[in-house]
Amino acid sequence: MSAHKFRARSTPEINTLKAQLISSAFARAKRAIKAGFYIEAVAIEESLICDRLEAILARMSRAEVKVSTIGKLLELLKPFDVLPEDLTEDLRLWQQHRSQAIHQIVKVTNTELSDWRRRLKFSKITAVDGLQLFQRLKQIDSRIARDQKRRTNGTH
């Protein structure tokens, strides 16, 4: 059985690495969308979104944060009331769309009879939405970080 993975503690080196990885992943997701590789973009975006949710949770809880899924992270963030309700709902919906785009691309069920073109269009919409959700989370995380820094420095 493997040990739980935790978010790395913030150090100048970790922060530099994190910024490089986020920048590269965001650029790659944008290129993937432009090239029509929507499922690749969605997979990258899930990692970006989880990373920002983990960052927000770490800032708010000031504790070690286990690497986790969107749904679990949203539950853990609920007591801190830092995410707007509409964003939480959008993230939950995106999580469902992400699962559908990735795991059901070829499945035909009694409720899903769409053709390839429609499934690809759905994946594209999901990929574009994922970038927007990441950017919203990044803004919230930046605001929380600024507010905490001001409080630490004694300014308001």
Image (cartoon, rainbow, N blue to C red):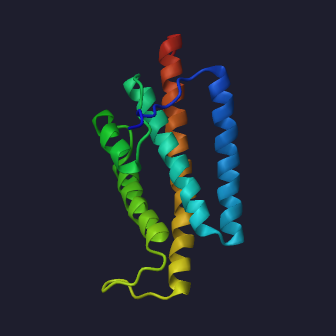
For this orientation, the residue located farthest to the top is: 154
Q: Is residue 140 visible?
A: yes
Q: Position of residue 20 (x, y in %)?
A: 70, 38
Q: Residue at x 61, y 20 (%)?
A: 11
Looking at the image, residue 76 sits to the left or right of residue 3; the answer is left
For this orientation, the residue located farthest to the left is: 79
Quadrant of the rendered image containing residue 43: bottom right
Q: Where 128 sits versus 91, above or below? A: below
Q: Position of residue 104 (x, y in %)?
A: 43, 74
> Which quadrant is home to the N terminus?
top left
Looking at the image, residue 55 sits to the left or right of residue 26; the answer is left
Q: Where 33 sits versus 136, above or below? A: below
Q: Residue at x 37, y 26 (%)?
A: 61
Q: Residue at x 46, y 31 (%)?
A: 6
Q: Where 151 sits versus 142, above or below? A: above
Numbered circles on residues, count? 0
Q: Is residue 156 visible?
A: no
Quadrant of the rendered image containing residue 58: top left
Q: Position of residue 60 (x, y in %)?
A: 40, 28
Pick the residue in front: 99 or 131.
99
Q: Residue at x 35, y 50 (%)?
A: 71
Q: Where 64 sits versus 81, above or below? A: above
Pick the residue in front: 20 or 84.
20
Q: Position of residue 96 (x, y in %)?
A: 38, 64
